Image (spheres, rainbow, N blue to C red):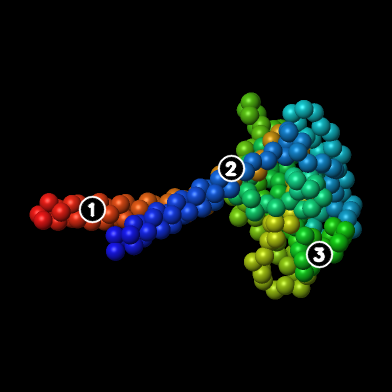
Amino acid sequence: MKRMDRIGKWVVVLVYSILLLGWWFEYSKCGDADVELFPQKTFDYFPLNDSAVGGFSTSEVQVTDSLLTASVTIHSGKAFTYAGIGFKLKSLDKRLEPLDLTKFDSLEIHVASKRMNSMKLRILTDDPKYSRRGDYSTFRVLEKDIPSSPYLLMGASKERFAISKFALSEFRVPEWWLSSVGLEEDDGMTHLDRAKFFEIVSGGSTLRGIPDEMEIRYVRLWSDNGAQKRTLYYYLGFILFGLVLFLGYSLKNCRGKNAEKLDS
């Protein structure tokens, strides 16, 4: 009987050891994720305009070590016109596959403008159902409007860059894209694990036919995996609580047996 008790205790100790090792393995995998698109120049960038969808807007890009500038002119002719800067997102490992943005949960960007008072951020993803290989116009579009800082209108203000920080979950599929593929309402899909392009384009306030200027000082994606870490801490608490109960039971049981020996 004593031998069975000892085996049982060792089995419990082994189980808890495996649980703690498994917890540590999962915790080590959820380290912070961070990638800087600019000024680190992690991905290739390019001048972007609406010619791919039949528009006539123009964009010219200039870059220094600390600033990415797009001189844009928006021309009428399409319902949704735009111009700006695009980043080609590729896997950091294979450099060929789309980038998995589900590893990140937040974005920070610093922008300034000459006349427009807003810009539009876009993430284009490779939708398995609607996207056609190599056809830019068929990628799923996710959009987010951000304020810009029109420095011609700010007087003596020294800071002309607008700084925006927000969660990637704030990106939304625009109604015009849903209509273009025949969807009456948002299907809830984003396919952020298949991101192809990140774009910074002119906002709705941009004047038609008048040259404007967009400046990008900083773009960063990151995640501290806070939610996943909190979940793992809850699991660790349950494991340690069970271990404390087991040790307390074992100690109490051991004392009881020692007391029996003394009484006899």
Question: In the rendered view, does 113 fall on the left or right side of 135?
Answer: left
Q: Residue type at mark 3?
A: Ser
* Label located before the other in sequence (2 or 1): 2
Image quarter in which the N terminus is found: bottom left
Q: Which of 228 and 124 is in front in this view?
A: 228
CA separation, marks 2 and 3?
31 Å
Q: Name the residue located 23 percent from the left edge and 56 percent from the top edge.
A: 253
x, y percentage for residue 123? 73, 53
> Residue at label 1?
254
* Label located before the other in sequence (2 or 3): 2
Image quarter in which the C terminus is found: bottom left
Q: Is residue 7 above or below residue 149?
A: below
User: Which numbered circle lies on residue 32?
Assistant: 2
User: Which numbered circle lies on residue 159?
Assistant: none
Q: Residue type at mark 1?
A: Cys
> Residue at label 3?
131
For mark 2, does the 10 Å Cα neighbourhood hold few (<14), some (14 to 19), or many (20 or more) residues?
Answer: few
Q: Name the residue located 84 percent from the left edge and 47 percent from the top edge.
A: 48
Residue extending farthest left: 263
CA separation, marks 1 and 3?
67 Å
Q: In the structure shown, which secondary structural element does the residue marked by tag 2 occupy?
A: loop
Q: Nearer the viewer, residue 171 or 72?
A: 171
Q: In the structure shown, which secondary structural element does the residue marked by tag 1 occupy?
A: helix
x, y percentage for residue 94? 79, 48
For mark 3, does the 10 Å Cα neighbourhood hold few (<14), some (14 to 19), or many (20 or more) residues?
Answer: some
Q: Name the residue located 43 percent from the left edge and 54 percent from the top edge.
A: 14
Q: Residue type at mark 2?
A: Asp
From this viewpoint, is residue 150 visible? no
Which is closer to the viewer, label 2 or label 1? 1
Question: In the rendered view, does 42 fall on the left or right side of 136?
Answer: left
Q: Which of 101 and 249 is in front in this view?
A: 249
